Amino acid sequence: MADTAPTAPTAFPEGTLMTRMGMTLDEVGADRTVGRMPVAGNTQPFGLLHGGATAALAETLGSYAANVHAAEFGRQAVGIELGVTHHRSATDGEVVGTATALHRGRTLATYEVVVEDPRGRRLCTARLTCMLIETKPLG
């Protein structure tokens, strides 16, 4: 399947977890989605980037990519499994995550998400699987 053309950076709605954590999107596409998050404000008490914050970034990026893919079928993506391996942590700056499609089917989509520190060192490898469901109105 061809990738849907990546979109320009998208702002997150106010009041969402992504906004509170300072996440931004650089690129959004079904095959690849890239985003960032500051370390400051997302640390655990010892000053290290919180593993849960890294997992939230990974799930956000994979979910955005999966939803671009799901839209091709008039569906929406919902995460059903997230596995995260933390290799190292960060104490400052901004981390960058890249979600890359591993599988894009009609009912499931799976992404590998790599999160790196400002020096390009891998902090985390995650795998997100999303189910593509019929679109339902919010509310």
Image: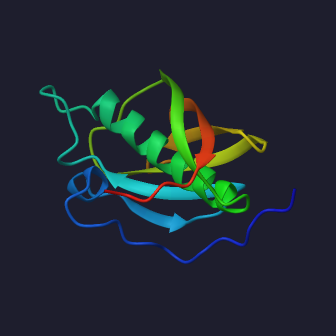
The answer to which quarter of the image holds residue 13 is: bottom left
Question: Furthest-right residue in view?
Answer: 1
Question: Furthest-left residue in view?
Answer: 45
Task: Note whether 105 is above or below 45 in the view shown.
Answer: below
Q: Which one is nearer the viewer's eye here, 1 or 132?
A: 132
Task: Note whether 11 is above or below 118 in the view shown.
Answer: below
Q: Residue at x 37, y 72 (%)?
A: 11
Task: Note whether 21 is above or below 86 in the view shown.
Answer: below
Q: Tell me residue 81's x, y (percent).
A: 53, 26
Q: Residue at x 58, y 64 (%)?
A: 28
Q: Tell me residue 32's x, y (percent).
A: 67, 56
Q: Say which quadrant the C terminus sits in.
A: bottom left
Q: Residue at x 41, y 34 (%)?
A: 55
Q: Which one is nearer the viewer's eye here, 15 or 122?
A: 15
Q: Is residue 97 visible?
A: no
Q: Tell me residue 134's x, y (percent).
A: 60, 49
User: Does 129 sit left or right of 58 as displayed?
Assistant: right
Q: Tell me residue 111's x, y (percent).
A: 65, 39
Q: Is residue 30 visible?
A: yes
